[in-house]
Amino acid sequence: MTYGRKAILILFLGDVVAFVSSLWLTLLFRYGQVPTDELITDHLPSFGLLFALWILVFYMAGLYGKRIVLFKSRLWGIILRVQSFNIVLAALFFFFIPGIAIAPKTNLILYLFISLAIVFFWRIGAFPRISRPSNRTHAAIIGTGPEVWELVEEVNNNPRYHLDFPVVEEPETLIQDFDLFASKLQEAGVSMLVVDTANDVLRPLLPRIYELSFITQRYQFADFYDVYEEVFDRVPLSLLEYDWFLKNVSATGASFYGASKRVIDILGALAMGLITLIALPFVFIALKLEGPGPLFLKQDRIGRHGEKVRAYKFRSMTSDNTASAEWVGEEQKTNRVTKVGAVLRQTSLDEFPQFLNILRGEISLIGPRNDIEGLGSRLAEAIPYYNIRYIVTPGITGWAQINQQYEQGNISPQSIEETKTRLAYDFYYIKNRSLALDIVIALKTVKRMLFRISSW
């Protein structure tokens, strides 16, 4: 599904062009003439640094997400919030950072207005038109289960994708009359087969599918798991069997990755520790003013390979729920998030005391989010393969936390179904974990802390 990556590349290049052309128009209006090469050269180095910073903010805000085009109504508000944040960055950059050779401060306000207009035009007007594929590849999907229909609905209802599924065939039907299926492919103009090769019912027909795809080369072939992961960034949970874990999950990563991750964890924990010490007296006073209760709470959570981890957090609720095996709707109504606790959760500051756990190597900055012991045991009984997520060191933030959208007001799964979705993201992370993926998670975590924008 390379089309999605091409669209993101086009989006990135278009943003660069939008920023540069905004500078050109700013100089045109400011000086009343076509900008000379010398004038552009004088301004471009300083503004170029600003462009790079803005691109990073765009990325952190999710504006290069694969599904960005699908939420046009929400895009206006997100761009406006991000550009407002960028205006603050621009002001700080030009007015307070020393060493700027020129003084473009008189041009800054004009540039911000022009760039905002051009970015809106490019993002909302032009890009959706040029990024939409003119011809969609017709594909047939062979499989069964809720994830199959989830993929079909997602792809068929969104013209952004470069393929659609006019033919959906369950293996049981296919095994009864393969020739009828072959005729359906011709009638629908199908040129690709997306197959759940792990389905046992299909095994007798795999030679015929192989012949169509590789011998006669009449159809392109794609594995259902690969397509599903590419679209949703998670694995199809209900279709997993033990052989999938044997093939795709390893308890150890590359030695360079492991060493780099540990260094980053230590540096991050030291920064978190410094912020915790600075914030501690203010949090203490705020909590005491709001009501009685301890400053910290201690939670017994599940660590790597099921080992117990004592985690420390700033208290955010009226009472201590350290051993709770319940979700929000099941808790006593007397236990609620405090006003100070709401701020701590919004800024994720309640998590920062866990820098002690990171320094001890019990948890990582990035990894599957670990559960309170009671709730973790309950989930392990209800969901197959659940404890495999603890084959790696758990983290404060992770792939599920930056991708999954929960019910309004919740910051974590509050049902078995939501937890299954989180688990699908966790398995994707465990399968694909790398330093590059960790960097993506870190940047998007900062985005959520700063912008509180839902995931795309």
Image (cartoon, grey):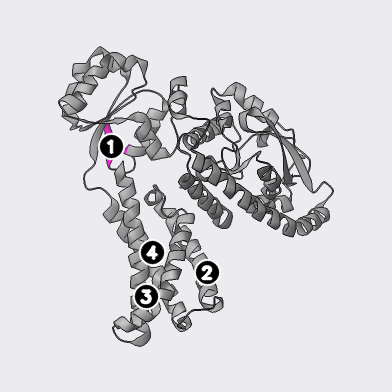
Judging by the rendered image, the residue that carries numbered circle 1 is: 164
Q: Is residue 162 magenta?
A: yes
Closer to viewer: mark 4 or mark 2: 2
**Label 1 packing within 10 angstroms: few (<14), some (14-19), many (20+):** many
33 relative to 413 in the view: left or right: left
SS of the residue under disc 4: helix
Which region of the structure is painted magenta? Answer: 156-166
Residue drawn 27% across and 18% down? 206
Nearer to the camera, 451 or 204: 204
Q: Position of residue 117 (x, y in %)?
A: 39, 69
Residue that badge 3 annotates? 23
Q: Is residue 379 above or below residue 78?
A: above
User: Which of the labelled discs sits on residue 89, or is there none?
Assistant: 2
Q: Which mark is residue 120?
A: 4
Three-letter residue code for mark 4: Phe
Q: Earlier in the sequence, mark 2 or mark 3?
A: 3
Residue 56: x and y in percent read: 46, 60
> Separation of disc 2 and disc 3 at Cα?
17 Å
* Image spot of residue 222 (x, y percent): 29, 31
**For residue 28, which quarter of the picture?**
bottom left
